[in-house]
């Protein structure tokens, strides 16, 4: 039996949970599907990660309207990936769409290719894709950090460093000690590393740990609601990254092909991480990028729909 490309065969909808982490601070999680965050201020609402389509964004709006009637004025993009940003049009009251300058440059450089690639890879996550008007363009772009005041509520928006992408941004609520980590941290879910900087990512995680958050909303997986869970989520993300990069570096040193490195990685890492969500989906992309980085390719190569299929055939021996 041939193996379907990426997650094209994953068609089962996930149960959503809208959980309050602090007064007026919420996480939308969905059994390992991409998470979003909501922060309610004195006079407006901030959404963290817009969701994949306007229709899916409106479903988040429905959750928000159960707890507040304040306008949704601000949308923060933790990074450029289509599944995080293409739903912006669903927030009709928005004023600010916020992103780091590195994220903005990635949209310029590879946003359309990523959109085409992601929709092909994982169609279930792009429900009602016909409602997407096109690429999402931020209108508030910052370099290192900025502070958003929602009345008296402070939200620090920080370009944390290279990791999942080169533009990774976090939202930190210093009073509530709640961190929205984007895909820098995953919990019970396999990190997607197709645009990653493996060597930098653990140091970026160190910057998150220094904040000593009491709760973390990861990119995927349930919200981490105790310091012990937070440490576990960061440690498990770090361990996965270090394992993949170690195998890739050893393979390159030994002159092994990408296919050989991938087969070894699957043999060694499936027992440890194979129970995580989207393991089978992510590993070909993760090992491909780690193999490139181990060869000295600093800027991740752009994934296109065509490159996706070529890689999948080479590593999994099948097409779409």
Image (spheres, helix red, strand yellow):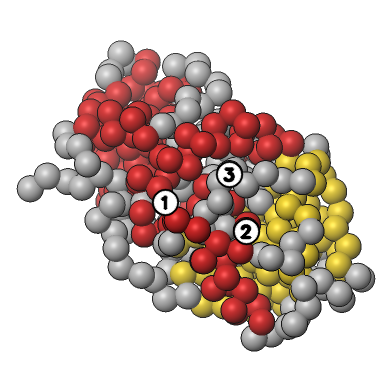
Q: Nearer the viewer, mark 3 or mark 1?
A: 3
Q: Dot 3: what SS?
A: loop
The image position of residue 161, as x and y in percent, is 68, 38
Q: Do labels 2 and 3 touch, CB within 8 Å?
A: no
Q: Which residue is mark 2?
A: 89
Q: Can you name the residue that lies furthest to the left here?
A: 1
- The answer to which quarter of the image holds residue 68 is bottom right
- Residue 228 is drawn in which quadrant? bottom right
232 above or below 3?
A: below
Residue at the limit of the structure toward the right, as seen here:
152
Taking the image as shown, residue 272 lies to the left or right of residue 4, namely right
- The x, y position of residue 293, in whole percent, is 48, 23
- Dot 1: few (<14), some (14–19), or many (≥20) neighbours within 10 Å? many
Residue depth check, mark 1 versus mark 2: number of the one nearer the observer:
2
Residue at (66, 65) in percent of width and height:
91
Residue 40 in the image: state x and y as whole percent: 77, 74
Horizontal arrangement in the rendering, residue 63 relative to residue 155 (left or right): left
Residue at mark 3:
135
Q: Position of residue 225 (x, y in %)?
A: 61, 72
Relative to the observer, which residue lies in front, 292 or 46?
46
Q: Quadrant of the C terminus?
A: top left
Kindly report the distance in space between the C-alpha atoms of the residues bearing marks 1 and 2. Answer: 29 Å
Query: Which residue has dot 1 on it?
Result: 190
Q: Is residue 294 left or right of residue 49?
A: left
Q: In this rendering, is residue 251 above or below 178? A: above
Q: Secondary structure at mark 2?
A: helix
Left/right of residue 237 with respect to residue 266 in the rendered view: right
Q: CA distance from mark 2 to mark 3?
A: 10 Å
* Cα distance between the residues tagged 3 and 1: 26 Å
Element assignment for label 1? loop
Residue depicted at 59% across the width and 28% down the height: 109
């Amino acid at each position: 039996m041939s193996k379907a490309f990426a997650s094209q065969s994953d068609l089962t909808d996930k149960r959503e949970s809208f959980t309050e982490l602090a007064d007026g601070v919420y996480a939308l999680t969905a059994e390992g599907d991409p998470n979003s965050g909501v922060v309610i201020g004195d006079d407006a609402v901030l959404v963290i990660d817009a969701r994949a389509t306007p229709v899916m964004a409106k479903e988040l709006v429905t959750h928000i309207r159960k707890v507040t009637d304040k306008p949704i004025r601000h949308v923060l993009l933790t990074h450029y990936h289509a599944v995080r940003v293409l739903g912006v049009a669903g927030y009709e009251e928005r004023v600010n769409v916020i992103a780091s300058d590195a994220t903005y440059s990635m949209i310029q450089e590879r946003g359309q290719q990523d959109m085409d690639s992601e929709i092909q890879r994982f169609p279930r996550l792009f429900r009602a894709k016909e409602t997407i008007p096109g690429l999402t363009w931020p209108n508030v772009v910052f370099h290192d950090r900025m502070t958003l005041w929602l009345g008296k509520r402070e939200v620090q928006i920080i370009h944390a460093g290279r990791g999942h992408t080169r533009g990774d941004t976090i939202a930190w609520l210093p009073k509530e000690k709640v961190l929205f980590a984007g895909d820098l941290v995953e919990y019970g879910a396999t990190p997607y590393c197709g645009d990653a900087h493996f060597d930098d990512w653990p140091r970026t995680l160190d910057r998150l740990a220094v904040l000593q958050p009491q709760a973390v909303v990861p990119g995927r997986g349930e919200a981490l609601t105790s310091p012990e869970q937070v440490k576990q989520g960061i440690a498990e993300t770090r361990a996965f990254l270090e394992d993949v990069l170690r195998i890739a570096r050893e393979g390159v040193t030994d002159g092994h092909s990408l296919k050989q490195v991938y087969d070894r990685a699957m043999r060694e890492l499936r027992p440890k991480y194979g129970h995580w969500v989207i393991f089978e989906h992510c590993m070909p992309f993760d090992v491909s990028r780690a193999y490139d980085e181990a060869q000295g390719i600093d800027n991740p190569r752009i994934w296109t729909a065509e490159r996706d299929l070529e890689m999948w055939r080479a590593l999994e021996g099948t097409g779409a």
